Amino acid sequence: MVDMAVIELSRLQFALTALYHFLFVPLTLGLSFMLVIMESIYVMTDRPIWRVVTRFWAKLFAINFVLGVATGITMEFEFGTNWSYFSHYVGDIFGAPLAIEGLMAFFLEATFVGLMFFGWDKLSKRQHLFTTFMVALGSNLSALWILVANGWMQHPTGSHFNPETMRMEVTDFMAVLFNPVAQAKFVHTVSAGYVCASVFVLGVSSWYILKGKWVAVAKRSFTVAAAFGLASSLSVVVLGDESGYALTDNQKMKLASLEAMWHTEPAPAGIAIFGIPSMEGRETRYEIKIPYVLGLISTRSLTGEVSGINELVVKAETRIESGIKAYDAVEKLKVDRTDLVARAQFEQHKLDLGYAMLLKRFMPDPRSATPADIQKAAWTTVPNVPVMFWLFRVMAGLGFFFIAFFGAAFYIASIRRFGSSDGFFRLFMRTAVWIIPLPWLAIEFGWVLAEIGRQPWAIEGVLPTFLGASSLTVPQIWTTIIGFTLLYGALAVIEVRLMLAAIRHGPIEHHDGPDAPLHHGYAPLPAE
């Protein structure tokens, strides 16, 4: 029998390290390309103020970049220390994108990041712009390969189980690379990172403008962030819709759970804007729906059907029964690899082998399962519906809020009312400062939504999460959780202090003081 305490603690540890690491990734993704935009303006206009703007935000990018790299390395090791069977079972497939990420993207970043920071006086303007672009490209390629790996976990295409090696193996790497779930996740995640960086730049710039400090730098940064953020926030919503469409064919249970849809509705299904889902009663009370919207989003038609949770559980029971036959064939092939009857039986039912593995949570041999056991295992394919339902609505609500927010920012930047003292202007600037944490909240909620929605699978339909963990003890895992929490807590304090110190110091070069001449374009103005 599986020790679920070890499994849940292993999941908790990985969640903590992943959530912490993901605090740095979005800002890196967004700031990198904002630096490219700012430096491109400098190269095209040859105005020194844009060099100052670029170097200031590059300083904040550097602090964030270092912490992101340091915390990402920990996660790579956890696959071996805490999820060793997962690594053994799917390492041939899952390891390839991670290796390419290291060889292609990370080395690309590492090669050019030093030139970007220390090459201002050694490279021509165009050469330095090229290094900045390569850092941005490397950062985003890194996200691509990570999300290719994660997308395969959500939708394991281009692979099969080999009864000769008892492992999953690649059959079509191009199918893994162009996995529709991975592509949808990549563009959605990267756009969310661009929104995060835009809110950050906008918030800091607004604080400078309110304080009357370095207004020349702040208003230019504000303008870039407003335009970049508006485009990014619109793309997040559009690409989020594409992610929902990808769920229809590949992760039907996740889609039904985030909508708390217990029964299949007549097409086209409505989308719930409010409700109180209950796992015990298997119902959603006080539900308020907008007709047709879910059907249009998820099927792109008025006739496409969105399956409900109960119907999907029945399908899971059927797949578990089929999977038991595949499991029986595998056990026979272990004894006699030349057993042609067992081989034929395996080939007929191999796509459902993972479903039989769900029974191992309750018994050592799935072949001894009763109909009641099969039904119990089938219901484990339902994730935490209330958590899914509300996380999605908070995330989506924040997405639409950012569109309105950046629309207002773009309007302010367009009419250039940076010196205005009216109530709306100052209220907006204060709001921009206070909402800086909101993109991180939306992004973390999105990650939790994606990963909880996949449960009980480590690899959707292939490997249950509880079978992927290493043979560890509860005290061992608690020791590492406490250690990581203390270490990451200290790093968080260092990160915040460094960022705040850099922001308070402002866009001043090492040879300049607070009374730098105006020709630098960033001298502080008197406080209002």
Image: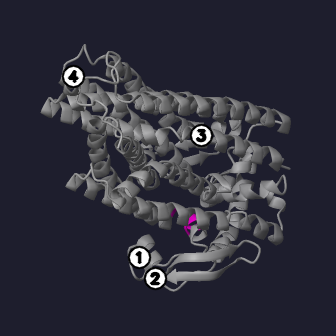
> Which label lies toward us, 2 or 4?
4
Label 4, secondary structure: give it: helix
The residue that disc 1 covers is: 296
User: What residue sits 53% from the left and 46% below the top?
Assistant: 150
The amino acid type of the residue labelled 1 equals: Leu
Whichever of callouts 1 and 4 sits on the residue coming sooner in the sequence is 4
Residue 372 position within the rendered picture, expressed as x and y whole percent measured from the top left: 82, 71
Find the residue positioned furthest to the top: 122
Quadrant for residue 406, please give it: bottom left
Distance between mark 2 and mark 4 Cα atoms: 54 Å
21 relative position to 107: left or right: right
Distance between mark 1 and mark 4 Cα atoms: 48 Å
Quadrant for residue 347, please give it: bottom right
The amino acid type of the residue labelled 3 equals: Tyr
Whichever of callouts 3 and 1 sits on the residue coming sooner in the sequence is 3
Residue 381 position within the rendered picture, expressed as x and y whole percent measured from the top left: 68, 63
Distance between mark 3 and mark 2 Cα atoms: 39 Å
Q: Which residues are magenta?
A: 250-255
Disc 1 + disc 4, Cβ < 8 Å: no
The residue that disc 3 covers is: 20
User: What residue sits 67% from the left and 45% below the top?
Assistant: 338
The residue that disc 2 covers is: 268
